[in-house]
Amino acid sequence: MSEDMEATGWGYTQIRVDSVCHKWTISNFSFCMDGIREKITSPKFSLEASDKVEWGLRVHPNGSDEESKDYLSVYLGLLHCQKSTVWAKFEFWIINSQGKNYQSRSSINVFSFQKNQYRGFKKFILRDFLFSNPHSLLPEDQLTLCCKLTKVKREYTNPPTEKLN
């Protein structure tokens, strides 16, 4: 039946997205283990200088809860925004000593973020594995973590301006 129907109007919606890759290096990382630091928070960042939305990263060297205590947990958080909700996807990875991406993990879905809400991976990488490869993953006792953030920027909808014949 739909084959016989003729369109009487049209419309177009474009979803615009912006992306940024934020690189964060934590020095003397081995001193953060064994419960000395519950969490480490990155400096704030935005997608662009004029953006009023601020983000931050958080690492829990000993996991974020009892279930993840043997892992490094990583999170992206929305720190400041003027809207009530921001929609975004994210990906985390470690930069190894050769400058290559290691242990990449991505969010499958686009998530809604509220102010001061963090989302990420509580079981990002096993701590024992991380520290058993210090020359590769922690060169000079530094952890270099990257986060690619893709934020839904705007939705443009063009309403039909004329009827189709």
Image: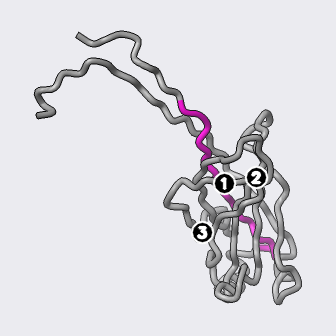
Secondary structure of the residue carrying numbered label 2: strand
* Residue 62, image quadrant: bottom right
- The residue at which mark 2 appears reads as 55
Disc nearer the start of the sequence (2/3) = 2
The mark nearer the N terminus, 1 or 3, is 3
* Of labels 2 and 3, the one closer to you: 2
Name the residue tied to disc 1: 113
| Residue 82: x %, y % from top left | 77, 41
CA gap, disc 1 to disc 3?
Answer: 26 Å
Position in image of residue 53 (x %, y %): 76, 43
> How crowded is the residue under tag 2: few (<14 C-alpha within 10 Å), some, or many (20+)?
many
Mark 1 in CB contact with mark 2 (< 8 angstroms): no
Left or right: where 43 falls relative to 77: right
Q: Quadrant of residue 75?
A: bottom right
Please name whichever residue, 20 or 161, is drawn nearer the observer in this view of the structure. Answer: 161
In the image, which is nearer the foreground, mark 1 or mark 2? 1
Q: Is residue 132 left or right of residue 36?
A: left
- Residue visible at 68% across and 76% down? 136
Q: Earlier in the sequence, mark 1 or mark 2?
A: 2
| Residue 132 visible to an observer of this rendering | no
Please say whether residue 144 is one of the residues in the magenta stretch: yes
**Where, quadrant-wise, is the N terminus in this rendering?**
top left
For the C terminus, the quadrant is: top left
Can you tell which mark lies on residue 102?
3
